[in-house]
Image (cartoon, rainbow, N blue to C red):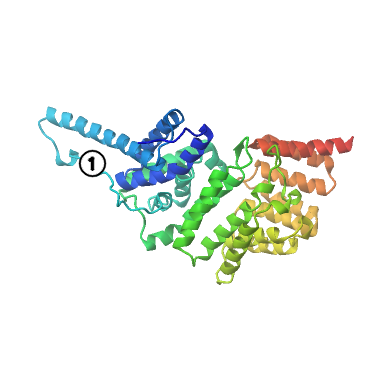
């Protein structure tokens, strides 16, 4: 196999992240064993990370990874067969069920459905609860760590680790094959699939930890997969709404950080840097979806994003319309983050005291109590209400509760700004 010149390690890292779900999907489709396939693909990724910087990148990286993963799992199966045969020979009996058939190598006419999309639907397995299916898919398709998934679910990391482990065990015990569902089953799994894509996008757009504010590889992959789901189900309003929400949000990406990677809030962003074609596409998608009749949560969130994106300046934002949309969303969703954003909209329309009053209910919500975003919003509203000391305290409190370095720096900068103003 010929190879090209070795690219920088960072490029290889991004390439492997992009290819991992595709390779895992292809391997599972071939071997029908999630656990063994995941182990084999992990070994293939480790081998690539070690070899490619030294020997150069293969012409077809995806095929290389699939081949290596297939060899790993085939070697494992053959070793297991040989072991069982030896044990059977000792007792002079070889049960038929021990004669394991090795899967044939895939030929050039192998089905070329997008393996990441296949894996996405496969992970929303009927043997799993919706929350477990989402957690497993975030691990397999999104490539998120257990800590990142736990943060997305607002649960401890140990709890999430147990949930993912049980999900794998449930799939194995169910005996239901891992395969692309029928159209009927696909419709039943769609809600979980969309939730997965939403969470992957959110983790990519604002990472829960680390030195970078965003992980464009994750948000871009979420958009790519959502486009594929939309191509499958172009008339589904919630699929269109989710794609619109992603496009309208991601359109602001270039304006969200400064030269040093520092966070720039929405009100201070240079809107000339926003992606106008993405905004146009997103607005068209959500407009068509809302005119279709049934309205869902993703469509409403996309409509809110569209109101923000269509305002020429921050002060031109139609906050009464946003507040009304959040009012509708509150009736449809029990998500505490929705309540948090509703409080911000309430403050923008009726003053900070009204927003602070709504935050009181969230203090008793175990899903958000102690979360840095609640402290950050309270700090912002206290600042607007003229309570400088309270704002400083909560900005610092929020900074101490986030694992995102850019968010920490931003929050501490706000606290320092108010402290200097006092003196």
393 and 235: which is toward the camera: 235
- Residue 285 seen in render: yes
> Dot 1, how many residues are within 10 Å of its Cα: few (below 14), some (14-19), or many (20+)?
few
* Residue carrying label 1: 102
Dot 1 falls on a residue whose secondary structure is loop
Q: Position of residue 150 (x, y in %)?
A: 54, 41
> Residue at coordinates 17% horizontally, 32% vertically from top-left?
85
Q: Is residue 97 left or right of residue 252?
A: left
Q: Position of residue 45 (x, y in %)?
A: 42, 35
Q: Position of residue 7 (x, y in %)?
A: 50, 34
Image quadrant in which the C terminus is located:
top right
367 and 261: which is toward the camera: 261
- Residue 191 seen in render: no
Image quadrant in which the N terminus is located:
top left
In the rendered image, the vertical position of residue 110 relative to residue 312, given as above or below: above
Q: Of all residues shown, which one is farthest toward the right?
A: 423
Q: Is residue 58 left or right of residue 339?
A: left
> Residue at coordinates 46% horizontally, 52% vertically from top-left?
130
Q: Is residue 170 left or right of residue 153?
A: left
Marks counted in the figure total 1
Q: Position of residue 62 (x, y in %)?
A: 40, 42
225 and 172: which is toward the camera: 225
> Residue at coordinates 60% horizontally, 53% vertically from top-left?
335
């Amino acid at each position: 196999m010929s190879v090209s010149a070795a690219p920088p390690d960072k490029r290889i890292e991004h390439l492997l992240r992009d290819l991992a779900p595709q390779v895992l999907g292809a391997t599972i489709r071939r071997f029908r064993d999630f656990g063994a396939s995941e182990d084999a693909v992990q070994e293939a990724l480790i081998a690539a990370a070690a070899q490619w910087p030294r020997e150069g990148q293969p012409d077809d990286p995806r095929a290389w990874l699939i081949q290596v993963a297939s060899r790993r799992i085939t070697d494992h199966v053959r070793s297991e067969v040989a072991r069982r045969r030896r044990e059977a020979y000792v007792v002079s009996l070889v049960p038929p069920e021990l004669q394991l058939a090795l899967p044939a190598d895939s030929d050039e006419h192998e089905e070329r459905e997008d393996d990441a999309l296949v894996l996405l639907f496969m992970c929303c397995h009927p043997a799993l609860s919706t929350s477990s299916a989402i957690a497993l898919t975030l691990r397999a398709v999104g490539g998120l760590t257990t800590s990142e998934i736990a943060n997305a679910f607002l649960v401890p990391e140990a709890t999430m680790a147990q949930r993912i482990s049980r999900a794998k065990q449930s799939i194995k015990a169910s005996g239901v094959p891992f395969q692309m569902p029928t159209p009927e089953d696909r419709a039943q799994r769609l809600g979980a699939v969309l939730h997965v894509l939403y969470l992957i996008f959110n983790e990519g757009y604002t990472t829960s930890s680390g030195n970078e504010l965003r992980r464009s590889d994750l948000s871009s992959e979420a958009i790519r997969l959502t486009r594929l789901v939309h191509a499958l189900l172009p008339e589904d309003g919630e699929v269109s709404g989710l794609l619109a929400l992603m496009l309208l949000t991601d359109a602001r990406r270039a304006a969200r950080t400064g030269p040093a990677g520092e966070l720039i809030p929405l009100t201070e962003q240079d809107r000339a840097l926003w992606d106008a074609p993405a905004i146009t596409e997103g607005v068209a998608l959500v407009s068509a979806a809302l005119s279709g009749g049934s309205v869902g949560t993703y469509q409403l969130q996309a409509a809110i994003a569209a109101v923000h994106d269509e305002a020429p300046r921050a002060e031109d934002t139609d906050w009464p319309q946003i507040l009304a949309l959040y009012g509708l969303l509150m009736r449809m969703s029990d998500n505490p983050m929705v309540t948090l954003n509703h409080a911000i909209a309430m403050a923008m329309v009726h003053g900070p005291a009204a927003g602070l009053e709504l935050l009181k209910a969230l203090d008793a919500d175990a899903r958000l109590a102690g979360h840095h975003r609640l402290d950050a919003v309270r700090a912002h509203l206290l600042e607007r209400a003229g309570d400088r000391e309270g704002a400083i305290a909560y900005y610092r409190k929020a900074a101490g509760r986030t694992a995102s370095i850019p968010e920490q720096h931003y929050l501490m900068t706000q606290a320092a700004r108010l402290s200097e103003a006092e003196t």
